[in-house]
Amino acid sequence: MMNRRHFLLNLVATSSFFASPFQLAKAARKPLLKPKRLQSGSIVGIVSPAGATFVREELNIVIDAVKGLGLVPRLAPHVLERYGYLGGKDKDRAADINQFFSDSSVAAILPIRGGWGCSRMLPYLDYQRIRKNPKILVGFSDITALILGLNAQTNLVTFHGPNGLTSWRKTQTDYFRRILFTGEAVTFQNQKDGDDSDRLVQVKYRTQTITSGKAKGRLIGGNLSVLSAIVGSPYLPNFSGAILFLEDTGENIYRIDRMMTHLKIAGLFDKLAGFVFGQCSNCSPDADYGSLTLEEVVWDHIQPLGIPAWYGAMIGHVENVLTLPIGLEVEIDADAGTIRMLESAVE
């Protein structure tokens, strides 16, 4: 007769055999993997993993931005292809990512823009190859799906930061260099906007404390719409003990409420150590109905958690897109409105 211990061992073995990709991704938690830092002359692969680029001049702007950083641009084979609103077929866009991760001469991968499409190609990425060839991947907006998916599947530190067609003004460029070239452990705090330079008080990018305190955890986050849409898939990192940041643009407030409710009832908020809400550009009430304010929605969902949390970070679809390390340990101070990296994000 099979004893209890043997029965349990057989049960575990049988369960492992029939485990889903989501269960396997959670079970196979790998050590943190950091990419190598950028140096002058490093090669940057330019890709189009989401929306299509219809105007060649836009690609030329990205090429010039890469050169302006002292880096060498290399175009992906399908960078100017178009499949409707997408930058090519799903497998072709994924093939560009896989190719650059396989190429030892490429140090970083930079998307031209966001839009929509990264989630569609996540099943076609070669995660074993990516893990064996770690390198910098940076982007925001729809690229949220890509940077979160890679982190979830490989535990590679990825970066919520500029797309090629963002502003590349001084503040944005400085943070990009400090994180990815110099390898600094940076403390992020809202910068004073130029419009406030001669004002008695700060008006733009003020912060508010939702719940006081400090918290440490792995930094996870990005665009709320994109993140919400991959909940339940194997491409969302583990939220246990994490610091979550969210941002969005062009959404009615009721839709922000609906997406945050999705995260809440999926049990994700209950796992967090801390929370930061960034900017929600052009997020307004529905004209046909009465509305909660954006602040009321965020406070309703976050304040009952009792975790350190703050509101108003300069993260999102704003003029300076800061470079934030996904999967790296950070500490937030909800009273000071800061996110402090606890170590370098690159080797």
Image (cartoon, grey):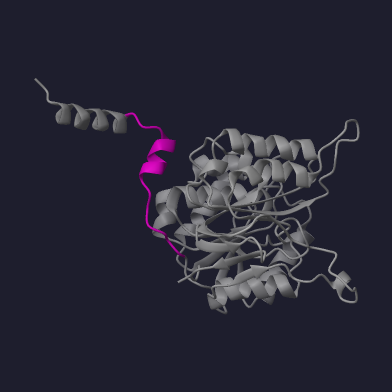
Residue 191 visible? The answer is: yes
Task: Give the position of the C terminus as an image quadrant.
Answer: bottom left
Task: Give the position of the N terminus as an image quadrant.
Answer: top left
**As rendered, which of 83 and 261 lies closer to the eye?**
261
Residue at point 48%, 58% (across, down): 101
* Residue 133 x %, y %: 42, 60
**As rendered, which of 8 and 74 lies closer to the eye?**
8
Residue 327 part of the magenta segment: no
* Image-based side of 51 in relation to 285, left or right: left
Residue at point 51%, 46% (across, down): 239
- Which region is colored magenta? 18-34
Residue at point 74%, 41% (across, down): 297
* Image-based side of 89 in relation to 237, left or right: right
Above or below residue 118? Residue 105 is below
Q: Residue furthest left?
A: 1
* Residue 294 x %, y %: 78, 45
Residue at point 68%, 37% (across, down): 259
* Image-based side of 34 in relation to 257, left or right: left
**As rendered, which of 13 and 62 lies closer to the eye?**
13
| Number of residue marks | 0
Quadrant position of residue 200: bottom right
Quadrant position of residue 160: bottom right
* Residue 179 x %, y %: 57, 71
Q: Residue furthest top?
A: 1
Residue 21 part of the magenta segment: yes
